[in-house]
């Protein structure tokens, strides 16, 4: 039995489908089973990673875990939750993040600091582990969906920032290999898409996918910061994200070949991702 956390999210949902297709017994963790809409054949269990006492039913009888961690929001509970998982699981595949370093202590309260903290707890916990360290998710561009549907434009910052965005399906595919194959214990895998595209090029690709052009309108950085904070993001986290994008204008994210090496298939292009998600960007008819 493989437990998938974050099973209703971008990567976890893909992991559920791919594990079922591989013939595994799959249990999905969610805080809201009623609205989870997961496929038939998966056992859906209620639980909260921020509340280790709520996880007994989810952990009972499991062999391994595909762990998506609710970054920052559950960090206070991480030591007890990882300890509880380690009492049951023999293998943990953890969706960490690119930029986490094996050596450096990273700042608590930041996204990378959160992942570094969880990685350290897993390393010490006992089960065999594999860390997936993906770069930016293609799914991040869904934050532009409402603007594109409503106005055919994206107002955002650092249009020339170039990223090697990755399809959530590819992250899950590597995770499924690590869970169902052998030889992945103690490995850390840096995962990216197959090419870098600037944010302006990403928006153009979304326009091609929906069959109508989408404009880019550059916003001042301080306006973008106010928007992120007004959506509930801590100011320090928002500043970190905007700073990283400013750097990617002159220093594009590099591309790794890890997805292809591990799955045997090239990583999925952003254009393909946009085609897969075109409905999210199309105005309602
Ligand atoms: N976005 C990026 O560019 C990027 C890059 C590298 C790494 N990452 C990492 O990838 C992970 C996010 O993956 P994602 O995009 O697939 O997530 P997502 O779509 O945002 O979904 C988050 C999932 O976490 C679950 N969740 C939230 N709080 C929970 C809690 N307290 N207990 C149990 N489950 C909880 C939610 O499930 P329910 O609501 O059903 O409970 C949901 O399925 C994060 O750790 C992030 O830091 C992201």
Image: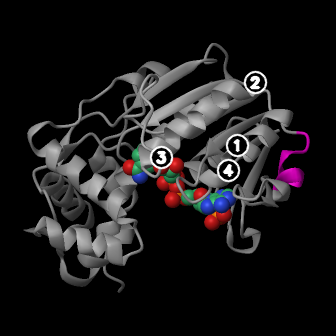
Does residue 156 sit above or below 198 in this rendering?
Answer: below
- The picture quadrant for ligand 1 comes to bottom right
Give the CA distance from mark 4 to mark 1: 16 Å
Residue 3 screen position, x and y as percent = 75, 44
- Where disc 4 sits, the SS reads loop
Q: Which residues are magenta?
A: 55-61
Give the CA distance from mark 3 to mark 1: 14 Å
Assign the magenta stretch its main secondary structure: helix
Residue ID at (76%, 59%): 51
Residue 190 screen position, x and y as percent = 41, 28
- Where disc 2 sits, the SS reads loop
CA neighbours of label 1 inside 10 A, class few (<14), some (14 to 19), many (20+) = some
- Where disc 3 sits, the SS reads loop
N-term-proximal mark, 3 vs 4: 4
Q: Which residue is mark 2?
A: 126
Identify the disc placed on residue 5. Answer: 4
Residue ID at (77%, 38%): 83
For disc 4, does the CB lie below 8 Å from ligand 1?
A: yes
Of residues 9 and 212, which is closer to you in this image? 9
Identify the disc placed on residue 108. Answer: 3
Q: Check if mark 2's residue and mark 3's residue have beta carbons within 8 Å.
A: no
Residue 203 screen position, x and y as percent = 19, 60
Residue ID at (14%, 65%): 221
Q: Check if mark 4's residue and mark 1's residue have beta carbons within 8 Å.
A: no
């Amino acid at each position: 039995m493989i437990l998938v956390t974050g099973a209703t999210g971008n990567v976890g949902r893909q992991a559920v489908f791919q594990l079922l297709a591989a013939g595994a017994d799959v249990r999905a963790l969610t805080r809201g089973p009623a609205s989870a809409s997961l496929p038939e054949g998966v056992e859906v269990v209620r639980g909260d990673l921020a509340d280790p006492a709520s996880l007994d039913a989810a952990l009972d009888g499991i062999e391994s875990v595909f762990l998506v961690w609710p970054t920052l929001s559950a960090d206070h509970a991480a030591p007890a939750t990882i300890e509880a998982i380690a009492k049951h699981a023999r293998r943990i595949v953890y969706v960490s993040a690119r930029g986490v370093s094996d050596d450096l202590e990273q700042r608590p309260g930041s996204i990378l600091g959160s992942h570094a903290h969880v990685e350290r707890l897993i390393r010490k916990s006992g089960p065999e582990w594999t860390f997936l360290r993906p770069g930016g998710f293609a799914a991040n561009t869904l934050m532009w969906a409402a603007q594109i549907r409503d106005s055919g434009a994206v107002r955002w910052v650092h249009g020339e920032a170039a990223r090697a965005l990755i399809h959530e399906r590819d992250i899950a595919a590597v995770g499924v290999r690590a869970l169902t194959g052998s030889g992945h214990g103690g490995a850390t895998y840096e995962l990216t898409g197959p090419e870098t595209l600037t944010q302006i090029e990403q928006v153009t690709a979304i326009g091609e996918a929906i069959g109508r052009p989408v404009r880019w309108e550059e916003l001042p950085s301080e306006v973008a910061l106010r928007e992120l904070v007004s959506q509930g993001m801590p100011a320090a986290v928002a500043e970190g994200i905007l700073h990283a994008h400013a750097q990617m204008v002159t220093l594009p994210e590099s591309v790794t070949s890890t997805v292809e090496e591990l799955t045997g298939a090239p990583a999925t292009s952003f254009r393909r991702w946009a085609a897969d998600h075109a409905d999210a960007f199309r105005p309602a008819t």
